[in-house]
Amino acid sequence: MNQNLRVPGPTPLPADVREAQAAPMIDHRGAEFAELLGSIRSDIARLTGSGTGAMEAAIVNTHSPGDRVLAVSIGSFGDRFAAIAEAFGASVERLDFEWGTPADPDRLSEALRAGGPYRSVLLTHNETSTGVANPIRELVAAVREAPGEPLALVDAISALGALPFEMDEWRVDLALSASQKAWMASPGIAIAAVGPRARAAEAEAAMPSFYWSFADARRWSEKGQTPWTPAVSVLFGLRRGVERLLAEGREATWARHRAVAAAAQRGVEALDLALLAAPGSRSPTVTAAWLPEGVDWASLNAALRKRGLAVAGGQGRLAGRILRLGHMGDVQLDDILDAITVLGEGLGGLRATPDPARAVDAARDAYRAEAGRGPAAAVPSGAPAARR
Amino acid sequence: MNQNLRVPGPTPLPADVREAQAAPMIDHRGAEFAELLGSIRSDIARLTGSGTGAMEAAIVNTHSPGDRVLAVSIGSFGDRFAAIAEAFGASVERLDFEWGTPADPDRLSEALRAGGPYRSVLLTHNETSTGVANPIRELVAAVREAPGEPLALVDAISALGALPFEMDEWRVDLALSASQKAWMASPGIAIAAVGPRARAAEAEAAMPSFYWSFADARRWSEKGQTPWTPAVSVLFGLRRGVERLLAEGREATWARHRAVAAAAQRGVEALDLALLAAPGSRSPTVTAAWLPEGVDWASLNAALRKRGLAVAGGQGRLAGRILRLGHMGDVQLDDILDAITVLGEGLGGLRATPDPARAVDAARDAYRAEAGRGPAAAVPSGAPAARR
């Protein structure tokens, strides 16, 4: 039985990505690798590691111990960004928002005025632990208007590719992502786009770094190499994932994620589950819902997996209290309708639950309404095809 | 044309490893992943990163800034280990040996007595940059007899699996490797085996660490997970590589590497190239040879690649002066004979060179002589089959 992998990363691999990553190994110091690296993009750092490695790289390349850092957190991954800065000796102050809500740009502006100057502000574009998308454009704008010219560092790991993002226009200084999210590749490659101000900050940064050095990555990149042996096979797949994104076109990709998310949100609600996020801040890539009273997560999860559906549970303080449905990367409406059906059946075995078929209808309607709004959300030429 | 990938890592992927790493993605927090992780081994840390990441992990998990460290270097990778310790604030003293020679245990003992006590000693089992295998057992013994009970940290990245190694019996405190070497998998997984004294040192270690934390890896490993999203597809392949090693049996694997190395060494010498290493210290996994006077590395390399052979050049001070032929992991005599033939042809185009056919005969003879010495070096059941 094929699994409907609906965790918020790693995401399902399209068949051509899987095929690409089965290619014979090559020399990472040879011409073929240089071509591979160049084909993905030459001006971003591709580091062999998890997304968390990219977060560590962002911190250590641009800070010195004692630097004042404002960490804006709306969930588990915001907390992680703060913890990394603390582990490396930054003086971290926190601006926390209730889990399930987005960060408020006005409150950020106030905090920056009242507490600044800061060396940097740590932001999360899409908080995977709560299914909330932050108003990242407005948050970055608040940072860039603050006294002391703090850097705006954005964890866009579960957002980049799936959500609109304008690095230059929004004046983001550093943005992070990871291969196993919207990029449709295997985990193992962390991605960092370093803007000019972050690059300038590297010269002064005194936190210890070796493996994660952006300067080394940049220097080796000039000859089409990486400083350390890279995850070559993951890059083979990532090249294919990038080709798929380019073929679909970014507006179409964003619209597809919006429409699929609308289906997920409406379908889950039609099963009588309450979402963590309010309508305006719901993530286009992951939907988080409260578990109904009396439903045990382990039992439900076992029932869903037995039916071929893999969703994620809660993290940290939300463990055992929520479920999370991922919809980023190679995802289409049918994947969501299948998930809603199985989730409804699984819940039905544990409690009185509305008819899954009606929830599926609601999900389909929501998809059509959203797909009708923007650029065509129906599968365009070159878009990911059905996986199963 | 299939390439004969004879760089000293990444190594060629057996067909079943390639097939394994093309498997559909799975949830890294699910039961299937726990089984995958357990099948590889439960008591070593598998970190998503390059081998250099494992070196950084070894340093930051067991040291505090200011710790006195003795770095024993016989080449480029020994220098790298020292540089990482320095980057994180250790007080590093160096015991260097000429590139192409091994480290001398007696001189190490003297240095430890004269300069000690040290918190740790950094050692290289197999120096990939010069094709020299260190007498690691004797070096570790010297460390363990030294005043101040220094830790013996061993970079065994290009050795583990291919060369005899007895972590417990030799009292190694920490040993490192990486998936793309003798393990026959893709790059992306760094491996660290942490002994009891190194583990005890973690409690006192004050160097900053987050991503590379052994304690976090250990805690998550207990529930069959990794702290951060791991390179799942690389682990799929690594599981297969480990199965192949177990099926061949370690003595047979070691003997195969010895015999194949004998063929490589004799074959290269029969082409009138001088090896960097003296007979007693030649590496079973990589052979390094001086380029003949007047032979340009770039031209030779281009000629070899055109003929389907990928070897490596020199690193650091040896760039442009040597070539390196890798023979670890999924390697058989035929791979070496092909490499000798192509290398002889390539050199023949640039200078007067002995007949490659005679060099191939010499290589085959050396293989047979070595294979006749120990446990069967002929392909045993379950051993890697011919790749092409």
Image (cartoon, coloured by chain):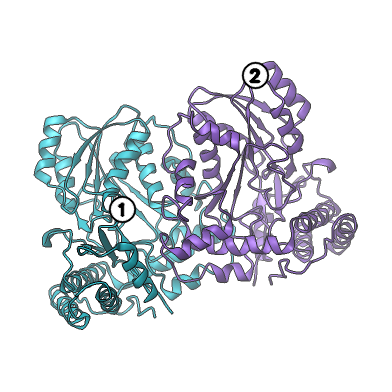
Chain colours: A purple, B cyan
Choose between B99 and B224: the one closer to the eye: B99
Tell me the chain of label 1.
B
Q: Residues within 10 Å of mark 2 (few under 14, many from 20)?
A: some
- With B35 as the anchor, is B147 left or right in this view? left
Q: Position of residue B306 (x, y in %)?
A: 39, 74
Q: Which residue is mark 2?
A: A116
Q: Residues within 10 Å of mark 1 (few under 14, many from 20)?
A: some
- With B115 as the anchor, is A149 left or right in this view? right
Q: Of helix, strand and loop, which one carries label 1? A: loop
- What residue is drawn where x is 70% and y is 16%? A114
Tell me the chain of label 2.
A
Q: Nearer the viewer, mark 1 or mark 2?
A: 1
Amino acid under disc 1: Gln
- With B200 as the anchor, is A183 left or right in this view? right
- What residue is drawn where x is 67% and y is 26%? A95
Amino acid under disc 2: Gly
- Tag count in the figure? 2
- What residue is drawn where x is 18% and y is 46%? B140
For the C terminus of chain B, the quadrant is bottom left
Q: Which residue is mark 1?
A: B315
Q: Position of residue B231 (x, y in %)?
A: 51, 56
Choose between B75 and A284: the one closer to the eye: B75
Q: Of helix, strand and loop, which one carries label 2? A: loop
Q: Position of residue B211 (x, y in %)?
A: 48, 41
Choose between A259 and A58: the one closer to the eye: A58
